[in-house]
Each structure stands twice: as structure tokens, then as C-alpha cells.
Amino acid sequence: MRIRNLVWAVVGLVGCAMAGSTRALAQTPVQIPSDNTAYGTTAAEFLLFPVSARGAALGNAFSAIATDLSATHFNPSGLVLMERPGMLASSMSYIADTRYNWIAVGFPMSGGSRAFGISITSFGFSDQPVYTIDDPQGASGETYSVSQTAIGGTYAQRFSDRFAAGLTAKFISDQLGRTTGRAFAVDFGTTFMANVNGRPLRAAFTVQNLGSNLTHAGNALDVVVRRQPPQGQQDIPQEPAQAELKAKSWSLPVTFRVALAYDAFATSAARLSLLGEFNQPNNTDAGFNFAGEYTVNVGRSFGLAGRIGYTYASDNNLDPAGASDPTYAGFDTGIGGEGMDGFSAGGGLRWRSSSRFGVSFDYAYRDLGFLGGVNMISVGLTW
């Protein structure tokens, strides 16, 4: 009898333990996968805009063949591949009546083994009405402006006939109304050159906008605080106190890029280059670009170029579920609709005199989906 009672006691204890374990498992919280991508957490996004019409037409898949002054932005190492001193200027009318301008000058040195360049970038708008909760119609007549500027210096060096590296240091100013933020950043790039089947192959690796955070300050953050008396006490007038709001600091849009360029066809009169690039920003998902450029030499003085490209990023994937319906979230994702977001195209014309003086003109169109399209032009001089 004692043995049987002991057995039942053990069975009871085991059953209680198993029941408790089951309840514990049932109460264990389920880990739901989360997206830790830092969407919308960076400032000075204008630093990611293409600085030349050639690069814009190629969908930004340009860092492997950037051998002109736009290399100060796309890949600093490419500046050392520039043959002659020059100047390049670009202008783009962006969305919402904003304007983007860029200009750079560069000089090869030491017989082409080194190069130095200076660039200035500006973006913004002016004289826009101020809307507040108390004045939602902007009837006060008060206006504000936004002016973003970056000044950069680039140094590049060729270490061999196959490898070059370069660095761009930038000072960034972001003026938003009556506040201003400043930051410093560097771009680093490398270019590796080889031949495959007798045709040029180039690989590039770049890191852009690696630097300090941007924090705004200014008299727009000055406020007057009226202190309230403690609850239950007589409402005695209080002296207002002067205070300054503290703005949050924002990181810069750091981007890592790996690019390849291959000349599928190349002669003394024509060339067809195929380009591809993978990029990983710190403020959104990874993306990729691919493009093609066809150039033709007309005699000794003239050159023509046609370009086409496509840029994929998470923001232009309007139908992630792959629905067969060409409309998604109220947008037309079919051909000719918002589904063309990321498409780019353009061309260029170059003329070179017998004295080595040259002039270039490039045009690019970029489709931004439901935001519309933008046009960009670039004009360059070499001597």
C-alpha cells in the first residue's frame, strides 16, 4: 500500500510539473520580426543627388567610369583619370520649385599621377509662406527660405596603372528658416582597372558622407516660457523665462557603393559600356542601378553619346506584393505611369579643338514616379 501511494504521489508531481511547463511555454512572448532600417532619420539628403547630367542619365551607376570633374562626387579616385584641367557646372529644376546647382574645377598634377579639385553644391528654395496653427492661411505675410550648401575639396592619386584612390572632404551647411546646422563629412573611393577579353573592365568601391551629425541652432529656437503656479495656490503673476529649444541631431546619408563597368564593344570610333552598381544607404533598404552608354566619335573634333539607366530603390517599389492589377495604392504602376519611377535617359555632345580646348554639353531626364520628372543639364570646359 505504501509503495502504491508513493507511485501515485510521484505521478502527481510529474503531471503538475508538465502542466506548469506547458503554461510557461504558452505564456512565452512571441518574437515578432521587426524592420530596424532607419527610415527618414538622416538630414542633408541633397548630398545624394547626382551632380552631372551624365551621371543622372546613367541612373547614378556611374562611379566606375567617373573620369571627369563629377568624380568629386561619384568616386573621388576617378578625378586622377581626368586628362586635362577643366570646369563643370550643372543645374537641375527639382520637384516643388526647388533648384539644385553644382560647379567644380579640377587640375591634374605630377604628370597625371595626382589630381586636385574643388566643388560647390547648393539646393533649396526661397520666399515661401509661413503657416502655423494660429495662422493656417499664412495671412501674416511672413516667409522663410531653405538653403543647403556643401563645399568640398578632392585629392586623388594613381598608385599604379591599375589602381587609384581618392578622398573628398566636405563642409556642409543647412539653413532652414532662421536656424542653421553644420557638419563635416568625407567621401572615399577606389578604382581598379583591368582587361577582360581585351576590353576594359573597371571596379569601384566608394563610401559617401561619412562624418559628424547635423544639429540646428538659431533664434527661431528661442522661446518665452510662462510658468504656472502650483496647483491649489493663488494665481500670482509669474515672470516669463527665456529658454532655448534643443534641436535633435541628425546623421548624414551615408552610402556604400560597389560598381562595375565593362566595355562590351570598343573601337577607335565607338564604344558601348555596360554599367551596374549595388548601394546600401543607412536610411533605407539596399538598391541597385544599371545603365548603358554608347559613344560615337565624329571626325577628330566631335563626339556624341546616348545614355539610358534605371535606379531601383525601395521607395519606387509601389507594388511589393506583385499584384497583377496595374493600379496599386491609387497609383498607376503600368508602363507610362508611376511604375516608370527610376527610369532615366539622356545624351551628350562634345567638341575639342586642335589646341586641346574643349566644350561639352549633357542632358538628362529622370522619372520620379508620381512626383513627376526632372531635367538636368551640364556644361563643361577643358583646356
Image: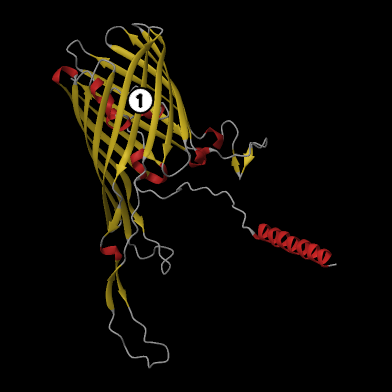
What residue appears at the point 74 percent right and 64 percent down from the top-left corner?
A: 13
* Residue found farthest to the front: 2
Q: Is residue 179 left or right of residue 228?
A: left
Residue under numbered circle 1: 204
Q: Quadrant of the N terminus?
A: bottom right
Q: In the figure, is residue 23 to the left or right of 263? A: right
Q: How many marks?
A: 1
Q: Is residue 153 above or below residue 86?
A: below
Q: Quadrant of the C terminus?
A: top left
Query: Measured from the top left, where is residue 192 in percent x and y?
Result: 32, 20
Q: Nearer the viewer, residue 352 or 6?
A: 6
Residue farthest to the bottom? 234
Task: Tell me, yes or no, if residue 266 can be seen here.
Answer: yes
For the point 63% across and 58% down, the residue is 28
Percent across and percent down for residue 307 are: 42, 21
Picture layout, residue 352 above or below residue 211: above
Residue 366, compared with residue 381, is above or below; it is below
Residue type at mark 1 is Ala
Q: Quadrant of residue 235?
A: bottom left
Q: Residue furthest right?
A: 1
The quadrant in which residue 58 appears is top left
Of residue 291 and residue 139, the one placed in the foreground of this image is 291
